[in-house]
Image (tube, grey):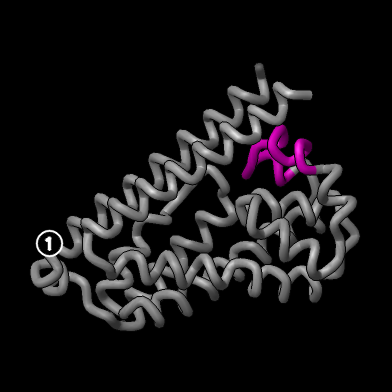
């Protein structure tokens, strides 16, 4: 029951973020001319955008994921993807190094230890380049970074390159989605929701059959 509740909370958080993403995309696409008067594609804007993403990666409960849409409207999806990937990688690396150097006393102030200890066994077991690459697909980057820093012996070099490659596809997909028509985004969101529900139903069915 407790695990089911945690899964529901995680799904709820994901749904909220995706809805915010689509809603912000609609606002940006509907008011692009107005927004461009106040937001210039200069170096200051890039630095602020990068800082927010780095901060969100280090302070795990914070999310600025929806602002990718705004960035895509200013810099285009490709450069937004590049800037976001660099920012996420820096943030994830900082989280990893904080956990590796200062351990639990500092990490517990930045992220839920309960979530980290839930990943302890995986972090200790998956220490190769390809295993970290796989974990990046299923586990949020911020939580995984702290977990690997705390519980694994993986070298930073391996972690760094696995992180870049693991996050890159998602970053560019998110950046591109922010530029497509609002109605298409809703359709994609619905399809994603249906697919996710089907996976949960199949998994539940298999569990009941055991």
Q: Nearer the viewer, residue 118 or 208?
A: 208
Mark 1 Cα shell of 10 Å, populated few (<14), some (14-19), many (≥20) = few
Residue holding disc 1: 30
Q: Percent position (x, y) of residue 72?
A: 32, 72
Residue at (52, 70) in percent of width and height: 87
Q: Nearer the viewer, residue 155 or 4?
A: 4
Horizontal side of residue 203 vs 66, given as left or right: right
Which picture quadrant has residue 205? top right
Residue 108 among magenta residues: yes
Which picture quadrant has residue 131? bottom right
Residue at (46, 34) in percent of width and height: 12
Residue 105 among magenta residues: no
Q: Percent position (x, y) of residue 67?
A: 34, 60
Q: Quadrant of the N terminus?
A: top right
Residue furthest to the front: 209
Residue at (90, 60) in percent of width and height: 153
Span shown in magenta: 106-119
Q: Is residue 131 above or below residue 201?
A: below
Residue at (20, 56) in percent of width and height: 26
Which picture quadrant has residue 27? bottom left
Q: Secondary structure at mark 1?
A: helix
Q: Percent position (x, y) of residue 177?
A: 35, 65
Q: Is residue 37 above or below residue 67?
A: below
């Amino acid at each position: 029951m407790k695990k089911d509740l945690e899964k529901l909370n995680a799904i709820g958080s994901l749904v909220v973020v995706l809805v915010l993403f689509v809603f912000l995309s609609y606002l940006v696409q509907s008011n692009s001319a107005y927004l461009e008067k106040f937001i210039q594609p200069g170096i200051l804007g890039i630095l602020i955008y990068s800082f927010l993403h780095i901060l969100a990666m280090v302070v795990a409960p914070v999310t600025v994921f929806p602002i990718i849409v705004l960035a895509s409207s200013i810099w285009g999806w490709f450069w937004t993807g590049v800037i976001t990937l660099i920012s996420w990688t820096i943030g994830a690396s900082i989280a990893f190094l904080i956990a590796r150097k200062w351990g639990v006393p500092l990490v517990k102030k930045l992220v839920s230890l309960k979530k980290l200890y839930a990943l302890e066994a995986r972090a200790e077991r998956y220490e190769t380049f390809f295993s970290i690459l796989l974990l990046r697909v299923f586990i949020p980057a911020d939580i995984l970074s702290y977990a690997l820093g705390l519980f694994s012996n993986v070298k930073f070099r391996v972690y760094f390159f696995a992180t870049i490659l693991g996050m890159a596809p998602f970053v560019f997909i998110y950046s591109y989605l922010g530029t497509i028509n609002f109605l298409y985004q809703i359709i994609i969101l619905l399809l994603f929701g249906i697919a996710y529900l089907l996976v949960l139903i199949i998994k539940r069915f298999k569990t009941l059959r055991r």
